[in-house]
Image: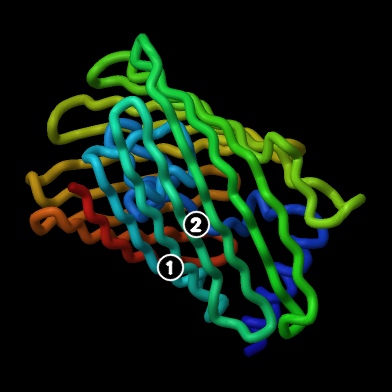
Amino acid sequence: MQNRSILLLLLVLMIGTEPASGAFEYPSGSVKSFAKAGCVNLHKPSPLDLYIDPALRILGKIGVDLSLSRLYNMSDFQLVSGAASLDRKTFSLTVGSTQLTGSDYYWERSYLLAASVGLPYRLRVGASANYLRVEYAGGYSSLGLTALNLGVAWHAHETVALGVVARNVNRPQYTSGSQSLPLTSEISVSYIFSDAFSFFLTQHLEEKVRDRFFVGQEVNVSKEFSLNLGLATEPTEISGGFSLGVGSLIFDYGFRDNVYLGGTHRFGLRYTR
């Protein structure tokens, strides 16, 4: 109970100031990306990865992605996420929702709407709106805001892809006069060495915060089974997991160990057609 109270206090302080940028950060994106320290496979993203970069395009015409997370060992909070994508080659649309549960005193929900269009020279641009609403003090107080994000993806080669994203470009605020959410950006590279091995690198930039670097690896043991590994800096996080496919369904598991908060687990289920 004491641990839960401590985390609740952290969450409320986050609302009053700004999102945690180092020691405390909600898992975002798919479980597969989470297991690679937050690095997205730009060649094979899933619907939840549109939370990271709205310019990404899923494989297949329809995709559904669900995940459940235990929010570190210090709390009973859980994060439930889901997203669905519809792709028509030159245009794609994604909707998603995330809910933080586990407390009668604080809850948080976010709703995502993302769209992207294909351009010549293997370019793709996208934009998303992420509405965030929080309630605390037993539901007596609530705050909400809408953050706008922009992204660009370039498939320079069949084996190389680049992605750039800028988040909170409208500098959203919970209340008039309060501190706005920081402008953040990421530069990502995906490189496929072979059918069995891929490498990923992401640089995370944020105002008034030291740059973070994410390094990820994906090893395809077989057509149905793959391993994911990752390392993040500032703070140091080690992550890993696996993906197991059964027909059109894919089960994902990811684990991340944070030097400040301990470990957190994520479970996911994906469907693509």
- Colour mapping used in the image: rainbow
* Mark identifier at residue 92: none
Above or below for 24 versus 114: below
In this rendering, does residue 133 appear at all?
Answer: yes
Q: Is residue 211 visible?
A: no
Picture residue at 52% right of the left edge, 51% below the top: 112
Q: Residue 113 at x, y = what percent?
A: 51, 47
From the viewer's perspective, is residue 117 above or below residue 120? below
Tell me what residue is drawn at x 27 percent, y 61 percent. 269
Hey, what amino acid is under mark 1?
Ser
Q: Could you say which disc has been placed on residue 69 in the image?
A: 1
Q: Looking at the rendering, which quadrant does residue 168 occupy?
A: top right
Residue placed under numbered mark 2 in the picture: 27
Pointer 1 local density, CA inside 10 Å: few below 14, some 14–19, many at least 20: many
Mark 2 surroundings within 10 Å by alpha-carbon count, few (fewer than 14), some (14 through 19), many (20 or more): many
Q: Quadrant of the N terminus?
A: bottom right
- Marks 1/2: CA–CA distance: 8 Å
Whether the residues at callouts 1 and 2 have beta carbons within 8 Å, the answer is yes
